[in-house]
Structures are given as structure tokens and as C-alpha cells.
């Protein structure tokens, strides 16, 4: 197997694995930049996956055909935002411990999604959907020699959408007044308040956007990778997205890069057995690689990562 | 005022449990299940006979220990979400000693439990060291350590300890906590001696925190790191020590499964959930030893009762998971409960 063959095997797979992580990690960026810790990404992603699977299944029944996954993305975003509003109310208005509230969100999403699955389908899992996002080549770009084959052929449209959204999130956060306000309430809410920015409102927006994007991430996972929803569909991808966000230093493009890197790690662990040189490495090292790397990154081996300064602290007017 | 906060300490968990059950009932109602029948089946599944009682107590032992682990870390200002991973390495260590060591029971059992505690302590001290040395937030590292533990323990079982059925061999009888006497007493439940270990651990935690200098220092660091530093307490050492002790409790929780309930360890497709339930138990028990035991009794009961609820009223067991999540949520939002109480109190005056 030549080096090019290996790349052709790994890179498209990495891009596919990364897409749900990218969306979810971008959601995390919104929430944490506004100053609200979101451990609940896992739960939000899980509920998005459930919503996606159910919507696509019924969309097929109603004759939406190829449009069903795309409709499901919209529905999953709305449901994800609604679900995140629970976390928002708890951590912003009720001043709950944000980590504990996030843990509760994870439990609640897992319990509710399986409960509803059992109620609706009388089984522990949703039926396998037939309408998936199909793999396709990007016209023109896929004709570029070498690069075209690696990056623009045989991949899902959602993957490119994820990269595109990352750039948009970067633009919104760093080039618009809205982004400046959102970041300011995460860094120094009192200063922001003094300047007339509504701290609570900005934080609500941040958390709701995180819910929408994590929901989208979950639905994309179902539509492109898993094909149905069971209790084991989302196991840790949300936490991995959280890790990607931290690894990417709370920056949208950093999160994008980290998610792609984790996608690569996942792709290698899935198809590592076919690659010479990697066959002999026990699979477990590839499985734990993203987590070990995150710990190393946090320990400062890849440069210091500074969290938003007001992260995790509820804002109280007039309190210094 | 003091009296008032003490009262709230009891009221917040009670009201949270009530609200959790209430909303669980509403969810059942909306989804077409009969809530009253379901809850009746749930409570019968907890109190309906000595078999259920035995199962509930058996379920309690790992929950008490994982609750103690979370509570101990909380007391010292740390949030240990890594109980799940520490539990897994403890489980593996206990089973390893249980299978490969030959000793009379009086040595073998304590040795296996000790191994679990040491394994959990080592696993827990990693996030502690990272926090003390590099200021890395323990919430993220403990979550990462959970996944590393899950995949690593599976790999070790697969490579070194595999028996038919994707699991290890059974532990030797000399290492087993199983008790024919307790089982007979409770109508053939799976009750084992682990509950004694769990209660002893609760007493140890109380003694350590409230009756020793070390405990005072740990609590002081949890209360105010900077003041403790100024008072000459070695904050870094205390952070590492706290995570190690917390991890030891979690590891011993794993030995409850390995030496008591199952007698072996399986290759786990996912987390056991016991470690995460420990967070709920600790929160509900207000991080006190006695509170943790009560919280574990509640959650152990709910989990066992849920099986009966599914059998009798057809309500999926996940409903109890939802109720537990809601209870954590309301405990976290104790502000809401305080606000509600104030409202009620003011209403009473008029």
C-alpha cells in the first residue's frame, strides 16, 4: 500500500468523522465565550441525534425523500436550542453551578431520548434510516490533482458545511459588534454591563446557539455516520467536542483544527488495521489518543490556553 | 439564621426529590403512562419484600462509595467527575488480585479491596497533580481520564484476563464478598458483605474530615485556597492528596462490583453510570457522610424499583434516570428552592 493510498483512505474518513465534532465544538465556543461552562454538550448532541433519527424516519414516511436529512438538521437545531434553554435558565437566571447543571443535562438527555425511543418505537433503538447524506465529489475541486482526490472526493456535503460554518463563526465572533459583545460578557461581565450590554441576554444567546449547533452535530452524526439512534450512538463525542474546543483554545478555527485532528485519530483507529506500520500498534493507543493529547495540551505542552476569564461564574449585578 | 440554613440543608433535597418525582409523573402522563400506578409499582419494588430490600442494599454499596468520592472532593473544593474511571481501574485491580493471588480469605479480601483503593487513588491523583502543578481544571482532565480508563481496562482484560463471554474469570472464593447467609436472609437476592465496607468507608471519611488535622487542612483549602496558603498550608499537596483519597473511595466502589455483585469484570461497551450517579448522591447528601448514605439509599431504591415499574406498569426504566437528572438539576438550582420557600413564607405571613 503506497503512501498516497493510505492518505486517500484516512483523510476522507477523518473529514467525515470530524463534521459532527466541528459543529458541536463550535457550539461550545459560543457558550463558553459568553462565560457559561457547557459540560452538557454531550447530552445536547445526544438529543440532537435522537431528534435527527426520528425526523428523518418520519420525513421518509411523509415522502420528503432526499430532503429528509436536511429537514432534520433544522429540527435538531431548534430542539437542541430548546433543550439548552434549560441549562441557560439554570446557570444564568438561577445561578446554579454550571458544571452540575451540565451534568444534569447529560443525564436528562440520555434518559429522555431512550425513554421516548422506547415509547415511540417500542424498541431500544430507532429504525435504520434509508435517506442519508450521500457521498459526492465536489465539482471542479475534485479534479485538482492529488489534493482533489484527498480533500474533495467521496465526502459528505455536511463536512464542507461544517468547515464553512467554522469560518462564519470566526467572522461573527471576531469581526462583528455582536461577537465583541458576546466575548466581553465572558471576559469581564461587569465592564460589559457598564457599557450597556445586557449580560444575561448575551449569555442566553450563547447557550442557545451552543444547543442549536450541538443538536446539529448530533443529527449530522446520525445522517452521515450511524444511520439510527440507540443508547450507544453518542458515547463521548460530545465530550470530545468539548475537548476539541479547549484544545483549540476557545477559538472557532482552533476548534475546527482540533476537531479535524480528532477526526483523524478516530479514522486511524477505525481503519488502522489496514495501514502498514500501524497494524502492530494496539488499537487502544489510537482510541485513547485524543484524550491523552487533550490532557497534554491542557498541561501546557502546546502553549498556554486561557479560558474566558468569567467562565463558570454567574453574573450578579453590583457584585465585585 | 444558623437554624434557617440548617433547615434549608434538609429542605432543598426533599423539595428537589418531590419536584423530580412530580415532573417525572407529568412526563409519564404526557406520554400516556399511568403515573400513579407506575409510582405504586416503583415503591412496591423498593419496599415490597425482603428480596427487594436486599437488592436495594446491594445497589447502595457502590453508590455510597462513589458518592463519598465525589463528596470528599467537593469538600476540598474539587469536582471529581472522574469517579467512573477510577471505579473501573479499581474494579480491574480488585478482580486481578482476586484471580491471581492465593491467600486465606482474611488476607485476600482486604488485599483485593486495598488494591482497588490504590488503583483508584493513583488514577485520581493524575488530575490532582495536573491541577496542582499546571493549574489544569480537574473537570476536563477527569472526564478525559474516564475514557482512558474505559478503553485501557477493556484492552487489559482482552489481552491478559479474557474468559469466554467477553469477561474475566471469576475471582477466587477467598476474595469473594458474596454471602450465602445474607442471600438466604433476603429471599435469594444478590446482597453481599460490601455494604459493611461502604459504611466503614463513610465513617472513615467523616473521621478524616472532621477529627484530624489533615481533614481540617483539606477543608480549609476547599473553603479558601488563598487564605490557606497564607496560613501556611501546602495547597498543592492538599489538592493531590484530596484527589487521591477521593479516587481511593471510587476505586473501592469498583471492588464492590468486582468482588461482590459480579465476581468478575466484563469488557464494558460504555460506562457503568455508578460513578456519575455518585455526583447525584453527593449533591443530594449535601456532601456529608450520613447524607451520602441516605442519598445512596434513595437512588439505590429508585434503580431497583424501576425494574418493577417496568414489569408492572410498562414504564421504561429510563424514567428513573430522568427523575434522577431532574433531582440533580433542582439541587443545583437551590436558588429556585430558596426563592420558592421565601414566597411561601411571605404568603404565610399575610
Image (tube, rainbow, N blue to C red):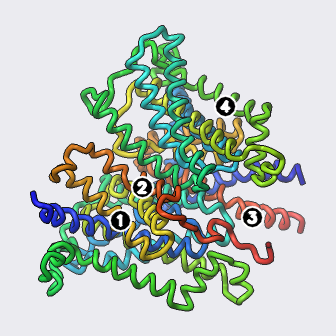
Q: Residue A49 carries which label?
A: 1
Mark 3 vs mark 2: give the one in front: 2
| Residue found 45% across the figure and 76% down from its top | A252
The crowding category of the residue bearing disc 4, from other C-alpha atoms within 10 Å (few below 14, some 14 to 19, many at least 20), is: many
Task: Name the residue that disc number 4 marks.
Answer: B202
Which chain is indicated by disc 1?
A: A
Q: In which quarter of the image is the N terminus of chain B?
A: bottom right
Mark 1 secondary-structure assignment: helix
| Residue found 58% across the figure and 80% down from its top | A183
| Among the two numbered marks 3 and 4 on one chain, the one whose residue lies closer to the N terminus | 4
Q: Distance between the residues labelled 1 and 4?
A: 40 Å
Q: Do the residues labelled 1 and 2 touch (CB within 8 Å)?
A: no
Task: Name the residue that disc number 3 marks.
Answer: B340
| Residue found 25% across the figure and 44% down from its top | A281
Q: Nearer the viewer, residue B94 or A211?
A: B94
Q: Is residue A314 left or right of residue A159?
A: right
Tell me residue B183's x, y (percent): 48, 19
Q: Is residue B324 left or right of residue A291?
A: right
Tell me residue A10's x, y (percent): 21, 62
Q: Is residue B189 above or below residue A100?
A: above
Amino acid at each position: 500500500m503506497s503512501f498516497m493510498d493510505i492518505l486517500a483512505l484516512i483523510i476522507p474518513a477523518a473529514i467525515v468523522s470530524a463534521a459532527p465534532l466541528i459543529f458541536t465544538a463550535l457550539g461550545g465556543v459560543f457558550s463558553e465565550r459568553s462565560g457559561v461552562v457547557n459540560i452538557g454538550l454531550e447530552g445536547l448532541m445526544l438529543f440532537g441525534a435522537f431528534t435527527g433519527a426520528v425526523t428523518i424516519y418520519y420525513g421518509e414516511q411523509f415522502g420528503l425523500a432526499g430532503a429528509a436529512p436536511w429537514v432534520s438538521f433544522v429540527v435538531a437545531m431548534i430542539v437542541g436550542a430548546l433543550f439548552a434553554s434549560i441549562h441557560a435558565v439554570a446557570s444564568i437566571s438561577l445561578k446554579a453551578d454550571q458544571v452540575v447543571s451540565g451534568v444534569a443535562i447529560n443525564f436528562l438527555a440520555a434518559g429522555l431520548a431512550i425513554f421516548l425511543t422506547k415509547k415511540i418505537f417500542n424498541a431500544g433503538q430507532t429504525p435504520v434510516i434509508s435517506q442519508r447524506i450521500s457521498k459526492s465529489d465536489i465539482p471542479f475541486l475534485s479534479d485538482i490533482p492529488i489534493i482533489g482526490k484527498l480533500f474533495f472526493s467521496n465526502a459528505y456535503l455536511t463536512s464542507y458545511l461544517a468547515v464553512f460554518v467554522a469560518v462564519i463563526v470566526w467572522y461573527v465572533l471576531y469581526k462583528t459588534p455582536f461577537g465583541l459583545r458576546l466575548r466581553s460578557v465572558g471576559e469581564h461581565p461587569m465592564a460589559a454591563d457598564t457599557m450597556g450590554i445586557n449580560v444575561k441576554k448575551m449569555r442566553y444567546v450563547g447557550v442557545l446557539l451552543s444547543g442549536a449547533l450541538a443538536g446539529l452535530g448530533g443529527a449530522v452524526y446520525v445522517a452521515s455516520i450511524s444511520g439510527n439512534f440507540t443508547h450507544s450512538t453518542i458515547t463521548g463525542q460530545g465530550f470530545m467536542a468539548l475537548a476539541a474546543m479547549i484544545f483549540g483554545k476557545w477559538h472557532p478555527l482552533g476548534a475546527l483544527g482540533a476537531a479535524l485532528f480528532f477526526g483523524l485519530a478516530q479514522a486511524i483507529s477505525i481503519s488502522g488495521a489496514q495501514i502498514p506500520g500501524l497494524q502492530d500498534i494496539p488499537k487502544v493507543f489510537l482510541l485513547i489518543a485524543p484524550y491523552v493529547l487533550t490532557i497534554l495540551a491542557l498541561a501546557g505542552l502546546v502553549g498556554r490556553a486561557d479560558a474566558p476569564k468569567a467562565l463558570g461564574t454567574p453574573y450578579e449585578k453590583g457584585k465585585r | 439564621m444558623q437554624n434557617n440554613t440548617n433547615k434549608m440543608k434538609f429542605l432543598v433535597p426533599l423539595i428537589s426529590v418531590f419536584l423530580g418525582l412530580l415532573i417525572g409523573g407529568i412526563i409519564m402522563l404526557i406520554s400516556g403512562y399511568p403515573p400513579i400506578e407506575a409510582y405504586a409499582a416503583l415503591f412496591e419494588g423498593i419496599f415490597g419484600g425482603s428480596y427487594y430490600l436486599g437488592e436495594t442494599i446491594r445497589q447502595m454499596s457502590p453508590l455510597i462509595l462513589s458518592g463519598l468520592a465525589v463528596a470528599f472532593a467537593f469538600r476540598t473544593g474539587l469536582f471529581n467527575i472522574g469517579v467512573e474511571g477510577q471505579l473501573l481501574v479499581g474494579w480491574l485491580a480488585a478482580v486481578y488480585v482476586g484471580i491471581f493471588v492465593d491467600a486465606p480469605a482474611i488476607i485476600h479480601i482486604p488485599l483485593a479491596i486495598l488494591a482497588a483503593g490504590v488503583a483508584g487513588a493513583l488514577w485520581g491523583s493524575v488530575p490532582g497533580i495536573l491541577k496542582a502543578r499546571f493549574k489544569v481544571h480537574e473537570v476536563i482532565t477527569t472526564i478525559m481520564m474516564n475514557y482512558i480508563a474505559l478503553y485501557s481496562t477493556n484492552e487489559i482484560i482482552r489481552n491478559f484476563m479474557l474468559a469466554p463471554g467477553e469477561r474475566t474469570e471469576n475471582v477466587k472464593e477467598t476474595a469473594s464478598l458474596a454471602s450465602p447467609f445474607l442471600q438466604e436472609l433476603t429471599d435469594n437476592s444478590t446482597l453481599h458483605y460490601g455494604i459493611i465496607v461502604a459504611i466503614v468507608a463513610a465513617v472513615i471519611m467523616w473521621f478524616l474530615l472532621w477529627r484530624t488535622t489533615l481533614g481540617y487542612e483539606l477543608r480549609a483549602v476547599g473553603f479558601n485556597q488563598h487564605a490557606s496558603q497564607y496560613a501556611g498550608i501546602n495547597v498543592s499537596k492538599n489538592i493531590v492528596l484530596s484527589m487521591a483519597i477521593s479516587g481511593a473511595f471510587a476505586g473501592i466502589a469498583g471492588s464492590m462490583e468486582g468482588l461482590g455483585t459480579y465476581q468478575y469484570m466484563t469488557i464494558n461497551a460504555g460506562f457503568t453510570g455508578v460513578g456519575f450517579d455518585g455526583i447525584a448522591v453527593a449533591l443530594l447528601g449535601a456532601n456529608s457522610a450520613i447524607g451520602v448514605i441516605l442519598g445512596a439509599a434513595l437512588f439505590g431504591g429508585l434503580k431497583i424499583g424501576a425494574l418493577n415499574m417496568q414489569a408492572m406498569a410498562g414504564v421504561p426504566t429510563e424514567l428513573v434516570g430522568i427523575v434522577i437528572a431532574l433531582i440533580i438539576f433542582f439541587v443545583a438550582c437551590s436558588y429556585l428552592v430558596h426563592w420558592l420557600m421565601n414566597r411561601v413564607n411571605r404568603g404565610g405571613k399575610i
